[in-house]
Amino acid sequence: MCGGRGSRAGPLPGAGIGTLARPLKRLQRKVSGGCGGGSSRGLLSHHPAGDSTSGLVVEGRERGLILLFYLVFYGFLAALFSFTMWAMLQTLNDEVPKYRDQIPSPGLMVFPKPVTALDYSFRVSDPESYRGYVDDLTKFLKSYDLEEQKNLTACPDGALREQKGPTYTACQFPVVSLKGCSGVEDPEFGYSTGNPCILVKMNRIIGLKPQGKPRINCISKGEKTATLSTYPSNGTIDLKYFPYYGKKLHVRYLQPLVAVQVAFNTTSTGKEVTVECKIDGSPNLRNQDDRDKFLGRVVFKITMHA
Amino acid sequence: MAQKTPEIYSVELSGTEDVGKTDTGDGKEKYRGLKDKRLELKKNHQKEELKKEVDLEDHKLSIKELERKYGTNIVTGLSSTQAAELLARNGPNALTPPKETPEIVKFLKQMVGGFSILLWIGAILCWIAYGIQYFNDKSSSLDSVYLGCVLALVVILTGIFAYYQEAKSTNIMASFSKMIPQQALVIRDSEKKTIPADIRLLSTQGCKVDNSSLTGESEPQSRSCEFTHDNPLETKNIGFYSTTCLEGTATGMVINTGDRTIIGQIASLASGVGHEKTPIAIEIEHFVHIVAGVAVSIGILFFIIAVSMKYYVLDSIIFLIGIIVANVPEGLLATVTVTLSLTAKRMAKKNCLVKNLEAVETLGSTSIICSDKTGTLTQNRMTVAHLWFDNQIFVADTSEDHSNQVFDQSSGTWASLSKIITLCNRAEFRPGQESVPIMKKVVVGDASETALLKFSEVILGDVMEIRKRNRKVAEIPFNSTNKFQLSIHETDDPSDKRFLMVMKGAPERVLEKCSTIMVNGQEQPLDDSTAEAFHTAYMELGGLGERVLGFCHLYLPADKFPETYSFDVDTVNFPTSNLCFVGLLSMIDPPRSTVPDAVTKCRSAGIKVIMVTGDHPITAKAIAKSVGIISANSETVEDIAKRLNIPVEQVSKRDAKAAVVTGMELKDMSPEQLDELLTDYSEIVFARTSPQQKLIIVEGCQRQDAVVAVTGDGVNDSPALKKADIGIAMGIAGSDAAKNAADMVLLDDNFASIVTGVEEGRLIFDNLKKTIAYTLTKNIAELCPFLIYIIAGLPLPIGTITILFIDLGTDIIPSIALAYEKAESDIMNRKPRHKKKDRLVNAPLAIYSYLHIGLMQALGAFVVYFTVYAQEGFRPSALINLRVEWEKDSVNDLEDSYGQEWTQYQRKYLEWTGYTAFFVGIMIQQIADLIIRKTRRNSIFQQGLFRNKVIWVGIASQIIIALILSYGLGSVSALNFTMLRPQYWFVAVPHAILIWVYDEVRKLFIRLYPGSWWDKNMYY
């Protein structure tokens, strides 16, 4: 990687390819032995300054040698680097990363995917203002399509689903449990009616086994300007979706989703609400970290204009 | 001297009386301004003036003319109002102290010098970047503000450190920086007086002055009222400020005071001679330019690339800062300072006190040494060198302790001679020095008598006891008209009632008084052949540059001079002719015993030693020959002419290797002729030179691109000391003005100490090369991450703060440790470096550090980085172009290669782990780098892996600091370090070993094929 840069910056000022080519060929014959140290006897006897032609030849030869040296040297370095990287990759497991210590607990993320900050803003009367959100949700839920899910297993509820392999199956996620946010009944996900849906998902972590009864608990912060409804009811995340076995083994795995639907109070003047969702009910899923604002929780704001 | 001082008052000088205070004292401060104006005017002409001979007319004037000129009367002096007026006009009689650079200026210089400017730019860019960020988004993170502060802090701390180092070394010298004290120096029983101003002598009585601080002549000069020489420095009727009156009394008229005195002129002009940049300062500047050039050009190049790759300008600025920080070896200049001061300490132990740190290296690149004779090459004391008696020349031991006097002492003549030496001598040891070795005892008496006293004390034992047994009954002291000294003694033989008259003096005068000569203890008539023998011996000893004394005696017949006879020295009621000549004795200020060896060393080290002295050419040449400045087999043009018996003009100049040039000859030379002289002759002695000429010689040498060292002790030397690339003052004999002007002070006044200094200076240059090579190497490993980050979009492999922890943390002690490395080969056997060709940082050094080892390091560190990411879930392929998503704060479900999703903070933490990994990767390889940098040419095994223990301290410090950063401070998030798994510390080890092996191969080829293209391109 750096090698490419280096060879460009090699000490070959102004040496044209043409002038180098000939001496280089001759050199290659001579230097076949190694790094070129052995060739010095014939090449480097100093010519008197007056003999300009042979001086040029010597200079050309030296430049050639240097060029050759850098080719060999950087070639060697590149090969070495490739080899060590290859060797390093051999230590990896295709299915599971070697260490998972840096993600002990999952983060929470919302859909539609926010563009910059977690700030949703739209105008009920203007479909263009929420088109992006709706498209994003539709796209995201595409893999949750009934058609897509038909080959998946219908798993029993309420228990961890540990598998031994060699093949791992994924559980169906009944998208209908998201009720009005499933996109089935309302392809606009409530945006057109002023009751926007936000999907909350828990980050995938290989081998994570939540304890207790994990659920997503969403509250609106500050003034009570809106009522929140969560689907599935109570925001439950079923344990049957855990543990996750990784992209390669656990093909077509669907992670459980929880939808939050916001209904603004008709009385409230400001159509704006800040929602905080947290993982609850599971002692090994952390939801409070000073530095990581997304570890087991997520805060987002919805502003709705008339 | 354009301005003549009309101030005058009578001053009486005497050996015994107190000198009247010469300054009226009032109104001293009020009129400073006036004087300063005048000085400024003068400064413009300083250099021209300096090279001119001193221009003073007053010595040619008669007393009447003088009175008229200065409007005074030599009997009544000036009226007090006149005096006050003159004081007002001319200022007090004191030298203006040299201007000091204000401390704050020195400090600020440290703040903006070197790389500081680059770092300041980096810091300011950081703040600007934050300002823009803040303007766009009030909640933007303070990271760039912190970084800016850290950079500013780095600059300020390194600045303070450098300033502190400077101040420390200046303080050592503070004790020397007092100006010439204006007070009487009480040195002996008979007092020495400092002459308080330049005076024209009006009446004298046996007055002798020591002008050595002005002219370098160590012999006392007699003073009289007559105008004897056109040159004011040579004439006898002028007494100079700050010179000392040794004996006699004199009255004179003050003609110049303060800065207008001859010495004042020289001293103040010396401070005006521009001090050239030291070679090492030039080298470091060159190096800073290279690195800054690389940093700025890569920075700007990648700024443009980043902008054209559609990065935000703000981000591009941050990259620019990263590239600058990565490229600048922040700790290096501080390291260089420490390294130099370590060497300075080492040199101080060897009696070379370095005033200016950079001078440490200057001495190493010295190619010409212009050395003083007296005191530096010689012992600065007269010593008996040869004796002539029984028609034979005997050699006396002139080594420092005199212990080995092997000449034949069985002859009866010697018995007589030794008696004369002992008795005809007024010098005495000062009492209370029983435990002091003879040669170190303080003697009251002049130089020749001291020499004779010590000589006889060494050979005969207690001289004072012998004198007591041979009681002195009469004495005629030496004076310049008689040119002899005579004394009459009772003998210690109780049966012999005769008086013994002993006499010593100028040989020809002594011989005139003799009619017989003693040979083998027997008196023989003095015939023509013995007289001839005497003359031959006299000429031979004189030709050696030695001062010859003749000795004779006479036993006064007991019948004519009975025991009760009363001798009267005024009427001379005793015979002073027809004496018996006993022998000659010659004295010289002998070379120090260590000097010949040191001169040989200089020669093999390619350093030309030139002697510049105020002494007589014959003496100068003799000393030059005896110390090897003129080697045994080389001849001067005059020598060849004498040998071939042809006129000097016919001798081909090419045949002569050596030249003795006098001040008079030098005066008539054009600069071109001087250049020719300096290049044509390898062995040159300048004799009878004036201080101004010393300056001309130094400039001549500098025109040859030589790095010139000049030694000196007198005030008169200070301009040359200042002009020289390195001025070396004598610590014992040196005047304060000389010490002030010098860069280095030889505490033992010994030329040989210069040679050890040269050795240290060369070693430090080599070791600085190693330090710089070591420090530059990792810059590539620090820079590549930024370049890859910009181009390939990897998550940032190493943070700016982490880089600072390498530059100012793990790397500092190791790079200082390289200063303790021993020389690889005999550095005193190679030529001094050419200051324009042999650079500290040359192309091979930069290329080898940057493009060979640096690149290998970068690869090694990337392996560690990729390993950490891959084992945590991000395979290398997934990392490419991940940067944008990776850094987005709003993306909290970034998928890795295994389908897991990461929040922003989890990624950030992984990024810091990556920083730590990259840091550890560089650190581990820097250990290998440190080991390979121990040598540039020899194998590590030739050099010895364990000889330099400090290297191991450095390695230990690297590892310990890294461990502390990772495991101790891993929880402090601002530092961006995390606890790294133990196994990651070893990932870069194979690369480290590879670096070692590669460098061993490089050195092997360099040793096997000297002069080959490999040697030319790979040896730094």
Image (cartoon, rainbow, N blue to C red):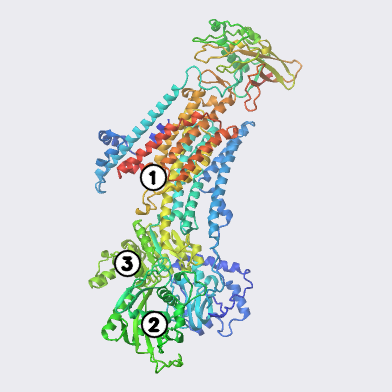
Structural distance between the alpha carbons of marks 3 and 2: 33 Å
Question: How far from the left and from the top, in percent, is residue B86?
Answer: 59, 75
Dot 1: element: helix
Residue type beneath disc 2: Gly
Quadrant of the rendering where the C terminus of chain B is positioned: top left
- Residue B575 in view: yes
| Closest to the observer, B949 or B23 | B949
Residue type beneath disc 3: Ala
Residue marked by disc 2: B505
- Tell which subunit mark 1 falls on: B
- In the displayed structure, does residue B389 sit left or right of residue B767? left
User: Would you say the residues marked 3 and 1 are in contact, meaning their CB atoms lie under 8 Å apart?
Assistant: no
Identify the residue at image location x=46%, y=32%: B861
- In the displayed structure, does residue B904 sit left or right of residue B702? right
Residue type beneath disc 1: Gln
Question: How far from the left and from the top, in percent, is residue B562?
Answer: 43, 93
Numbered disc in front, either 3 or 1: 1
Q: In the orientation shown, which residue stands out farthest toward the front?
A: B495
Which is nearer the N-term, disc 3 or disc 2?
A: 2
Question: How far from the left and from the top, in percent, is residue B696?
Answer: 40, 65
| Closest to the observer, B962 or B189 | B189
Near mark 1 (Cα within 10 A), the count class, few <14, some 14-19 or many ≥20, is some
- Tell me, for residue B659, which label it has, or none: 3
Q: In the orientation shown, which residue stands out farthest toward the bottom?
A: B560
User: Where is B594 relative to A152, above or below?
Assistant: below
Question: How far from the left and from the top, in percent, is residue B421?
Answer: 40, 79
